[in-house]
Amino acid sequence: MLAWWFGITLWKRVIGALFLGIAAGLLLGDNAVYLKPIGDAFVAAIRMLVVPLIFTTLVAGITAMGEPAKLGSIGVRAISLYLMTTLLAVSIGLGFGILFQPGAGIDFTDVTPNPVAAEAPGLVERLINIIPTNPIGALADGNVLSIIFFAILFGIGILVAGDKGRPVGAVIESGAEVTFRITHWVMEAAPFGVFALIAWVAGTKGIETFQAILTLALAVYLGCFVHIVLVYGGLVRFVLGLPLVRFFRGIFDAQAIAYSTSSSSATLPVTISCAQDNLGIRPAVASSVLPLGATINMDGTSLYLGILALFAAQAFGLPLDFGDYVLVAVTATLASVGAAGIPSASPFLLATVLTVFDVSPEQTALMVGFILPFDRILDMMRTMTNVTGDAAVATAIAKWEDELDEDTFRTPAVV
């Protein structure tokens, strides 16, 4: 029995669990909530690995580079590419908002307002907060950007220390290998976790909820699909000259986990594992670009914010001109950077974006109250988009930095 189970490739087991979870959720209805603890346990197991995986693999990757200057090149390229794809994402979102008119005819009469805070930390404050006052505390709290900052300094310190630093580097490299072994074990539990989470969503949210926001859902799902195919697919196939089907096959496990958990941060260990094992991205890039992407690359969020901005304008009858569209695009791009990689964080960024065309706090509260009950369904697709973007950008950086094993990338996947 076990031989038969493990003889099926993981992605097939995961996609089967997706469909079975939907069927089970619709069959069980609200009783599907009893399956949720299984999914929660799976997510907790993945989250358990996030901090040790980021720290050990990033430090090991830096020491493998041999020169700190290369890290600067990787960082500049990664951040530039992440911002570029995010701006393209919000532009696609605005386009689909215009095309689908999701806010036309929406009635907020029976909606309970859900107040949100309009104030968000400024850019300078965000940058200062990256520096951990207590590295151990940052590790304990799972503050990804602070962990990355400290890991970079620690890795550079090992390089500068020379012979005296090598024993520490060897220990951390061994730690990274051990963490990867555990990650593979946790990934084997993915079908059960995905089944439970999808059943819970399908059972508690139901088809009726999805039908109530069908136009908005279609705009978000199709917008994300177009962004994945045109932007990420175009980057991999035409800019990098790599086989596109192989890319998507290589990251399918990470996409499935992202879709079921709705959390970029929780999916990170699986994304790193897929990038290194399936795509041939070496640790120097995978361990630095992917954690950074899980924190600042929120293309699905920016696309969603673009659609929601037009949703609000259409629902409240507010006319927009070209200047408003430009401001929405820029604001949504900046607001999405550093958005929490947790389920349903996006609606609470609305206050920042909607102030561009004078939507009142009361109207924003109505919007959030309308969206939150079914946002999980939309968040699943947004998160899958974010994780796909992380992998695409990491592939590009690895190719440009000569840190991509193309033989591994081009090796046909075992189906």
Image: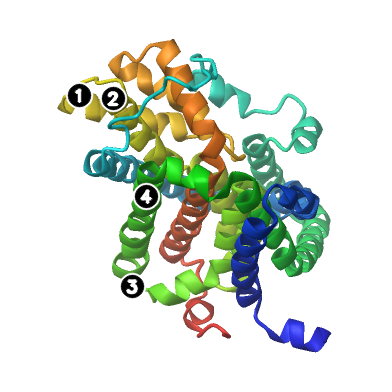
Task: Tell me if residue 378 can be seen.
Answer: no
User: Percent position (x, y) of residue 392?
Assistant: 44, 60
Residues at marks 2 and 3, CA–CA distance in whole angstroms? 41 Å
**What residue is disc 4 on?**
218
Q: Nearer the viewer, residue 309 or 163?
A: 309
**What residue is disc 3 on?**
241
Residue 329: name its quadrant: top left
2 or 3: mark nearer the eye: 2
User: Percent position (x, y) of residue 291?
Assistant: 60, 48
Residues tagged 3 and 1 counted as in contact (Cβ below 8 A): no
**What residue is disc 2 on?**
313
**What residue is disc 1 on?**
320
Q: Residue at x 41, y 22 (%)?
A: 108
Q: Amino acid at mark 3?
A: Gly
Of helix, strand and loop, which one carries label 1?
loop
Q: Which mark is residue 95?
A: none
Of helix, strand and loop, which one carries label 3?
loop
Of helix, strand and loop, which one carries label 2?
helix
